[in-house]
Image (spheres, coloured by chain):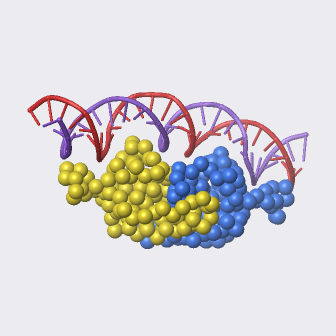
Chain colours: A yellow, B blue, C purple, D red
DNA sequence: AATGTAACTTGCAATTTGCAAGTGAATGTG
DNA sequence: CACATTCACTTGCAAATTGCAAGTTACATT
């Protein structure tokens, strides 16, 4: 069941799903290979843990990410993008590229883990 | 002067500039050829007028849009994307395309005026 | 002069954020 | 085995942002 939509516009609907201050950054971290809560929390933007927990839940609910048992640390969960989540990669690239070309002082430090 | 940035990541910086609930929709309207306050306010998402006024100011401040005297209704102002604002078009397209392909029930009604 | 309309502004109430501190389970250490 | 850590969250608020409705101001039309 989709979150509440403001209109049927595909752009507006996409924003209703991932268009807040933090969700896309969490997706970015997953796209870079990060998997654990702590790693997301340690990103330079310093997302608050309550918001991170909330966004992770919503990403899972929305089918963009999935929780799975962490292979290296048994007992803990990890997160990864689903197939649907992976399709957002070009969207993130478009946003990042725009920033790189139009905002002075941004640096492409997006490196996979 | 750029708005406060959470990190130097180009993706994060782009979001710091336009990554809120409404800004991108206003840019969409401008990209569709809408020019007046009333037109933006009449979009199906029904942005509140105080927020619209605030976002228009910030878009102008940020150099993505510009105010100019309305040609058809003298005395009033109109808004249009600047060159920099126009470069966001592919970003909006990426977001809209993703919605169209991944969110059921979205319809591409994005038609220029 | 009275009415209308566009473009805001103002006043709040309701959400959402952000920060700090706390909790509970699983590990690591002596 | 007792004890301190670490991780993954929760909880409690205060502060900021949103959303809604009702003004207000300037210009134009009747």
Q: Quadrant of residue C28?
A: top left
Q: How far from the left and from the top, in percent, is residue B29? A: 63, 63
Horizontally, is D1 left or right of A113 in the view? left
Q: Is the C terminus of chain A in the top left, top right, bottom left or bottom right quadrant? A: bottom left
Whether residue B39 can be seen here: no
**Residue ID at (39%, 64%):** A112
Q: How far from the left and from the top, in percent, is residue B69? A: 82, 59
Q: How far from the left and from the top, in percent, is residue A96? A: 52, 64
**Residue ID at (38%, 52%):** A40
Q: How far from the left and from the top, in percent, is residue B55? A: 65, 52
**Residue ID at (32%, 61%):** A80
* Viewer-side residue, B54 vs B47: B54
Horizontally, is C22 left or right of B33 in the view? left
Q: Is the N terminus of chain A in the top left, top right, bottom left or bottom right quadrant? A: bottom left
* Viewer-side residue, C6 vs B100: B100
* Viewer-side residue, A84 vs A29: A29
Horizontally, is A11 left or right of A2 in the view? right
Looking at the image, is A55 positioned above or below residue B93?
A: above
Whether residue A99 can be seen here: yes
Count the numbered circles shown: 0
* Viewer-side residue, B106 vs A41: A41
**Residue ID at (28%, 55%):** A78
């Amino acid at each position: 069941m989709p979150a509440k939509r403001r209109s049927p516009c595909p752009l507006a609907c996409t924003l209703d799903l991932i268009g807040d201050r933090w969700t896309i950054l969490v997706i970015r971290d997953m796209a870079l290979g990060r998997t654990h809560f702590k790693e997301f929390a340690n990103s330079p933007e310093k997302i608050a843990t309550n918001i991170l927990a909330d966004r992770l839940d919503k990403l899972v609910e929305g089918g963009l990410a999935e929780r799975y048992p962490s292979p290296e640390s048994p007992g803990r969960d990890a997160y990864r993008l689903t197939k649907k989540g992976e399709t957002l990669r070009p969207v993130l690239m478009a946003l990042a590229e725009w920033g790189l070309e139009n905002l002075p002082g941004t640096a492409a430090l997006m490196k996979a883990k």
